[in-house]
Image (spheres, rainbow, N blue to C red):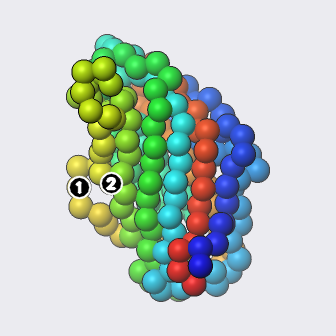
Amino acid sequence: MNQVIASSYTDGPALTAAAAASCLPTYVPTTLPAGYFQIGRVWRLRAMGRISCAVTTPGTARFDVRLGGIVVFDTLAIPLNIVAKTDVQWALDILLTCRAVGSGTQANLIGSGIWLSEANINVPLPSVGPGPGGALVPFDTAPVVGAGFNSQSALSFDVFFTQTVATGSMTLHQFLLEQLTP
């Protein structure tokens, strides 16, 4: 049985700076109790929103999942389209699996997923091609275990977004974090 850990019912902030910032509405980040993680526990993170990028300096999009301020999953930098895009839809779907638990930095997660958007590099206009192109995440590499964290402590959960240049914007419209396994 799936269990909802966190979800949104309003937009997150409109992010325009070339700096990492939480993309979630302020009521969404949650604190997980000490001992919450178990080996084999799986999360599904789904997020959707809109993004804009400039033609001359589109930059990259990057999402990361943080527990207690530690980046436990990173999509890495996803190149944005060199054709200007204004308020086009994006979708992010990630599976995260707990691989280890413990104190200090012994606990870790492994994750992979997909980011879909017309703002992805080399994606044609919907009128001339198939739907939005996708990028497997983490981008351009095999999935790896994220940074270690202390699963024996209470941990705050958050999702951050970074666009490498301040020529675009991103707003999250929908968010769901669910636990898929007991």
Q: Position of residue 2 (x, y in %)?
A: 59, 73
The residue lying furthest to the right in this view is 27
Asked if one can make out residue 99 in the rendered structure from this viewpoint, the answer is yes
Q: Residue at x 36, y 61 (%)?
A: 112
Q: Are marks 2 and 1 in contact (CB under 8 Å)?
A: yes
| Residue depicted at x 39% and y 70% | 110
Q: Is residue 108 visible?
A: no
Q: Is 160 or 53 nearer to us in this picture?
A: 53
Q: Residue at x 57, y 84 (%)?
A: 182
Residue 34 lies, in percent from the top left, at 68, 80
Q: Residue visible at 40% across and 20% down?
A: 85
Judging from the image, what secondary structure is the residue with disc 2 in? loop
Label 2 belongs to which residue?
Answer: 138
Horizontally, residue 124 falls left or right of residue 162, namely left
* Identity, as a three-letter code, of the amino acid under mark 2: Pro
Q: Which residue is mark 1?
A: 141
Task: Give the vertical position of 99 relative to 9 (above or below).
Answer: below
